[in-house]
Amino acid sequence: MSASILREAARARLPELRAAHPHHFLALSSGRMTAISFLLGGVALLVWAVIRLELTPARFLTGLQQLGHFLTLMVPPDPGGKTTLILHGLAETLAIAFLGTLLAACLAFPVSLLAARNTTVNGIVRFASRRTLDTVRGVDTLIWALIWVGVVGLGPFAGVLAIMTSDFGTFGKMFSEAIEAADRRAQEGVVASGGAPWHRIRFGVLPQVMPVIAGQILYLFESNTRASAIIGIVGAGGIGLHLSEMIRTLEWQVVSFIILLILVVVAVIDVISGRLRAAIAGTRT
């Protein structure tokens, strides 16, 4: 059958199809109208933000010139006789990240069992656990650092508490989602063999989710190493405190040395944690 005959047949059926499915022949369907509305709203928000925040090309170019000036002041990187002090601050930063991540994971794990749909006690407990995690997670780590500095004073203890509190909400959500995604067949097998509810969790859920949880902990430890360097600027200990001090005293070569040192440490942790995650993933297969 030739293409022209097919076109004629389709054209002949067009009125019938239009009468049977009128919503498909609208110039603008409801879905298209919704998409266009979101697009126009996004464009309007973008224009408003550019005008409200005064994001002009002139200011951007001026900022680039100023950045170039600061970069010239940072060359070459030089510890300035503060190598021991800087390395001590770096070790403190790693300790803050490690302890904060570990404590957050330990506290979040039992709460995640209550927040997961397939391991919780009842719907009310699940709702309360979810909302608690959302509330804690809604406050940034830097804000938690400011709060804990005011509570326990300056120093690394406040940094550990800030990382722990912030990651408690993040871990709780990530762990609960991993638990809910566990394969139900293993759980049903445990129950069918006469296992109690806690047996279903112990032998049907945890063996599946523990490698996932371990990978998430390693990833957030890497992320927290960067975060703990930032919260030190507000007095929560670590190398961030020395970085803030060097910036205030305009010792830009020391600043560049600290920044490069942080980048190297984060890169090393990224490589190590990546290999550990690959090894953990290999044990699952």
Image (cartoon, rainbow, N blue to C red):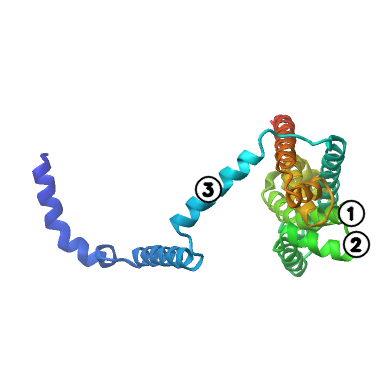
Per the model, the C-alpha gap separating discs 2 and 1 is 8 Å
Which is closer to the viewer, label 3 or label 1? 3
Type of the residue with mark 2: Val
Per the model, the C-alpha gap separating discs 3 and 1 is 37 Å
Identify the residue under disc 2: 152
CB under 8 Å between discs 3 and 1: no
Can you see residue 119?
no
Q: Position of residue 139 (x, y in %)?
A: 72, 63
The quadrant in which the N terminus is found is top left
Relative to the observer, which residue lies in front, 174 or 157? 157
Identify the residue under disc 1: 157
User: In the structure shown, which secondary structural element does the residue marked by tag 3 occupy?
Assistant: helix
Q: Position of residue 252 (x, y in %)?
A: 70, 43
User: In the structure shown, which secondary structural element does the residue marked by tag 2 occupy?
Assistant: helix
232 in relation to 33, above or below: above
Can you see residue 95?
yes
Q: Position of residue 222 (x, y in %)?
A: 73, 41
Type of the residue with mark 3: Leu
Q: Earlier in the sequence, mark 3 or mark 1?
A: 3
CB under 8 Å between discs 2 and 1: yes
Relative to the observer, which residue lies in front, 92 or 67? 67
- How packed is label 1: few (under 14 Cα within 10 Å), some, or many (20 or more)? some
Identify the residue under disc 3: 64
Q: Earlier in the sequence, mark 2 or mark 1?
A: 2
